[in-house]
Amino acid sequence: MTKKKAASDKTTAELEGADKTGPDVSIMDACIAHAKEVKATQLELIKSKGYDFAPEFRDMTIQLYLFGVMWKFAENLGSADDARELAFAALAEFFVQERMPQQKVAKRIEFLRKMSKIEEDHNALAVAIGYESEPGDNSLAEVFDHYVDDTQVSGAFWRLYDRGRKIMLYGGLGIAFLVIWFVTLFMPGNTTIAILASGLIAAAIFVIPVFLIGIFIYRTKIKKAKQAS
């Protein structure tokens, strides 16, 4: 009870000290301050869990969770009619304050809008749990616990993908360079187009099998994960 009263007093103080240009601005500032506090608390709580997720999935899940938190917080402050849109606006400003490049903010918000809804217009799991969360609970851990056994979003799977991508990129470039060097040095008389074409063909001969092997490994892992579940 004391914690809830303290949180209420803090919210009132935030609103009183916010920009007075309009009620939405004050609510948005309070939402951002609340989201920062929740994020710091929740990240501290999950630190000991040792979750190993793909970085993009981890970031997206946290952002959707914070969107749900801000949505509910905006409603509690009396902005029920447009609380969802206000939460997205607050999330965009939150990204700006966390030094996300301005040109990426709009694209990120558009992406999160799409991911915040699932089939039949239901909210995504992270959004729903964030919306229902309470201060100091383990709600973010609850979200991540749903995906612990999901191979497609695991950190190990992401690292495998990242290594394969680098092998294709640097291996293809290296082989192309070697072939171009060999043809130029030991097979003089070829045109520039023919030399470049030989490099591209050599790179393709390397990249295509590596890509197919990667697809095979991906399907094998997914198949094993489905059988295990």
Image (spheres, helix red, strand yellow):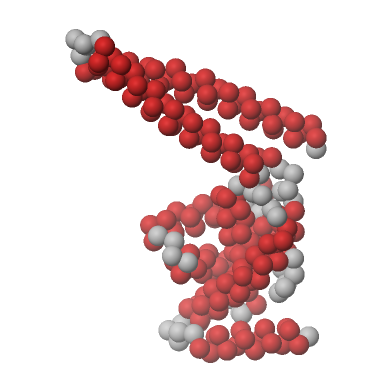
Pick the residue in front: 139 or 71. 139
Tell me the quadrant of the picture where the N terminus can be found: bottom right
In the picture as drawn, the residue positioned furthest to the front comes out as: 186
Residue plotted at (49% across, 31% down): 167
Residue 225 versus residue 112: which sits nearer the camera? 225
Residue 211 in percent (x, y) is at 52, 25
Question: Horizontal and vertical percent for residue 127?
Answer: 65, 60
Image position of 178 (left or right of 128): left
In the image, is 223 to the left or to the right of 22? right
Is 166 left or right of 144, judged from the image as shown? Answer: left
> In this orientation, which residue lies closer to the viewer: 115 or 224?
224
Residue 140, image x, y percentages: 69, 62
The reply to whether residue 80 is in sight is no
The answer to whether 130 is drawn above or below residue 8 in the figure is above
Question: From where the camera sits, is residue 204 visible?
Answer: yes
When the figure is inspected, residue 107 is found, relative to residue 177, above or below; the finding is: below
Estimate the x, y position of residue 207 in percent, counting from the top left.
Answer: 47, 23
